[in-house]
Image (cartoon, rainbow, N blue to C red):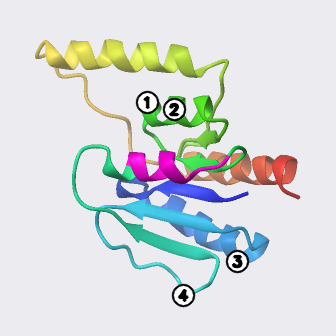
Amino acid sequence: MKIYVDADACPKPVKDILYRVAERTQLPIIFVANTQLATPRTTKIKMIQVPKGFDVADNYILNHISKGDLTITADIPLAAEIIDAGGHALNPRGELYTSENIRSKLNIRDFMESIRGSGIHVGGPPPLSKRDRMAFANALDRFITKHYL
């Protein structure tokens, strides 16, 4: 199993958790972004820099994941495609996207997109809290225990 990270928008505290997980579990973690990231020097962490452009990092992940791999992403359309490809997706707040919940998440996302498109300002998600970081770390540990260890 590999863990892919949609790293352009991944919060730093989540990246830090993933660095520790790579060291502790020896699972390969691949950060994919269109800007170079400073990552710890270890054979288990890889940084892939893709060209700038719409969905370039997403497409890289989709072209490289295998069935059972995990992707860390807040991008709901990407999560849906990963699930359709037999992978798993976890968001940085610790919510596991599943075949049971992804369609409703897509519907809500599309609805919010249409509201923003009509000129109504709805704001974005709140900053990542300590509780969110803990929820992510716990969800990641549960996932790894269930699917890897």
Q: Residue furthest bottom?
A: 41
- Residue placed most toward the observer, 111 or 78: 78
Determine contact: label 4, label 2, CB under 8 Å: no
Gap between marks 4 and 2, in whole Å?
31 Å
First reached walking from the N terminus: tag 1 or tag 3: 3
| Residue at 76% in and 54% down | 141
Gap between marks 4 and 1, in whole Å?
31 Å
Crowding around mark 1 (Cα neighbors within 10 Å: few <14, some 14 to 19, many 20+) is some
Which residue in the structure is indicated by mark 4?
A: 41
| Residue at 58% in and 75% down | 45
Which residue in the structure is indicated by mark 2?
A: 81
Determine contact: label 1, label 2, CB under 8 Å: yes
Q: Is residue 144 left or right of residue 115?
A: right
Crowding around mark 3 (Cα neighbors within 10 Å: few <14, some 14 to 19, many 20+) is some
Gap between marks 1 and 3, in whole Å?
30 Å
The quadrant holding residue 21 is bottom right
| Residue at 61% in and 36% down | 95
First reached walking from the N terminus: tag 4 or tag 3: 3
Residue 77 badge = 1
